[in-house]
Image (cartoon, helix red, strand yellow):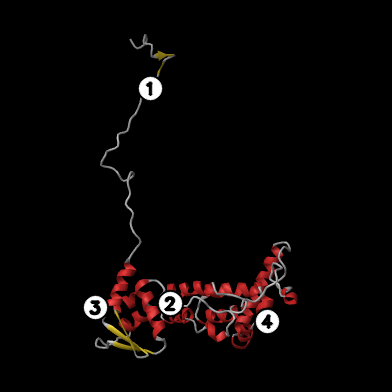
Amino acid sequence: MLESSDYLKDDCLKINCTVGVVVSATNCSQLNSIQVPESDIGAHFGMLLDNMEGSDVIFNVAGEKFHAHKLVLSARSPFFRSKFFDDGVEEDEQEIVISDLEPVVFKAMLHFIYRDTLTEDVDMATSSSSPVCSVSETLTTKLLAAADRYGMDRLRLMCESHLCKDISVNSVSSILALADGHHATELKAVCLKFAAENLAAVMRSDGFTYLKENCPSLQSELLKTVAGCEEDCSSEGGKSRSVWAQLSDGCDTNGRRVRQRT
């Protein structure tokens, strides 16, 4: 029978099949999706800070009182963790005096600890035309110092990011000094690169005079950065101007004349 079948040709049997797949109606994971909102844990912890519910420690900052929670502070800052659990703070010691921060800075730091964001009144604008000392008086800079002192790396990096936007010919020297003093490594690297690429204009600024008088070690680091820029110029086949050539005409490494921001 098989040998006489029309389906057998040259000792080969070909079978054509149609396969169908039935998807269960109960399996809808690929057909539908549910959007999950962004985390609101910061808002919840912020409410805990605002209503002071369950607070077990009070900070006295220049006479202004701040209620907080030891566990929250300890989870966010190694300084507070050490103070509350490693240094044997007495259980009945509920008020702690903070003498190294201003109330507005401490309040902004608490805001970050609970909400993981910066306060709206953080001063983002660093006036590049102001004296060197004014840069250190901005809330962002003071918060950077607090982040370094209390061991909050994320807060320090957020402050670095904001200060980075304010770097100019007039401000770079003072911001560089601040970054070096508060272990802001990424901000320091940006300042060194900017100063090296605009060396002539930076050297004529008031901030550079401050740098020479107060931070001689940073001058050596700046020279190393300049040397690195020189190597980059050479590797680009002469398309960029020598960094040292800026000293004669006040231009940057691309031949553009640099004007100080006012």
Q: Are marks 2 and 1 in contact (CB under 8 Å)?
A: no
Picture coordinates of residue 162, whole percent (x, y): 50, 73
Picture coordinates of residue 59, whole percent (x, y): 32, 86
Tell me where residue 45 sits by quadrant.
bottom left
Instruction: State the mark number for residue 54.
Output: 3
Type of the residue with mark 1: Asn
Q: Which residue is mark 1?
A: 16
Residue 36 vs 126, above or below: the answer is above
Going from the N terminus, do you reach mark 3 or mark 2 first?
A: 3
Type of the residue with mark 2: Asp
Residue in the picture at 39% in, 14% down: 8
Towards the viewer: 133 or 262: 262
Type of the residue with mark 3: Gly
Q: CA distance from mark 1 to mark 4?
A: 86 Å
Q: Which residue is mark 4?
A: 204
Going from the N terminus, do you reach mark 1 or mark 4 first?
A: 1
Picture coordinates of residue 5, whole percent (x, y): 36, 11
Going from the N terminus, do you reach mark 4 or mark 2 first?
A: 2
